Amino acid sequence: MLVATDLTKEYQSGTSRLAVLKHVSFSIPQGTFVAIVGPSGSGKTTLLGLLAGLDTPSAGTVSLDGVDLTRLTEDERARLRGEKVGFIFQSFQLIPTLTAIENVQVPLELRGEPGAAQRARELMDRVGLADRIDHFPAQLSGGEQQRVAIARAFSNAPRILFADEPTGNLDGETGERIVVLLEELNRESGSTIVLVTHEMYLAERAGRIIRLKDGEVVEDRTL
Ligand code: ADP
Ligand code: MG
């Protein structure tokens, strides 16, 4: 369970304080698939950063499986992210000098996991890229690069995966395929998925839609 309670994030801008998130509260049960929607600048990326423990709120708390992230040190939060959290971004963020499979395998090796090569191969197969493992990112389409990023994000079997506009750089059909893949992995792995998207038809694949406007939750709807 991921619980946000009264989350507020303010930035100092000159002499005034700008609140980009205001008293945001919700609970996301383990294993559910939630979409966060809202216009550009409404605070979606800021919210994901707080939920994932990448950033700390000005007020309020985030608790993941009963652990209050706001009470942890930066090192403790980093460890918890390594154990429980996966991420994918609009810009894929693959390492250009590594092949597709190496992008998945190297993080597994860095974590000292036995059988990293085998696990990387299975993950590449799962995202439908078994025949592209030795391609470099520049030799892959956007949709293929995002599938490598998904394989990498799922490599530590995260309790929760955050995806910040992962289809923003993809055409509609490719974007839809990415969201279908996330949906399947959610079902198979029981990982919670929190998807930020602009596209309502993609958000509607989730079981629930949380809408932000000007830093506030203006709608929280179970589908
Ligand atoms: P979204 O992802 O919904 O487009 P963001 O969370 O990126 O929105 O940004 C919400 C608001 O917070 C924006 O107005 C943005 O300018 C502001 N903002 C984000 N990060 C910072 C920062 N580090 N300093 C000051 N303002 C910020
Ligand atoms: Mg954003």
Image (cartoon, rainbow, N blue to C red):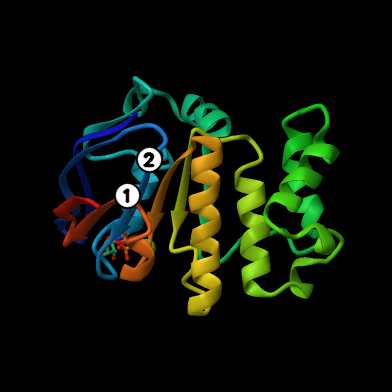
**Which residue in the structure is indicated by mark 1?**
207
Q: CA distance from mark 2 to mark 1?
A: 7 Å
Q: Is residue 214 left or right of residue 178?
A: left
Q: Could you say which is closer to the camera, residue 208 or residue 158?
A: 208
- Looking at the image, do the residues carrying marks 2 and 1 touch, with CB atoms under 8 Å apart? yes
Residue 114 vs 223, above or below: the answer is above
Give how far across and how far down residue 81 sits, in percent.
51, 34
Q: Which mark is residue 44?
A: none
Residue 6 in the image, given as x and y percentages of width and height: 16, 37
Three-letter code, disc 2: Thr
Q: Quadrant of the N terminus?
A: top left
- Residue 98 visible in the picture: no
Q: Residue furthest bottom?
A: 171
Count of residue discs: 2
In the rendered structure, which amino acid carries the disc numbered 1? Gly
Answer yes or no: is residue 45 visible.
yes
* Residue in view at x 37 percent, y 48 percent: 48
Residue matched to label 2: 32
Ligand 1 image-quadrant field: bottom left
Left or right, residue 120 beside residue 71: right
Q: Residue at x 15, y 58 (%)?
A: 15
Q: Position of residue 103 (x, y in %)?
A: 75, 52
SS for tag 1?
loop
Residue shown at the point (63%, 73%) measured from the top left: 142
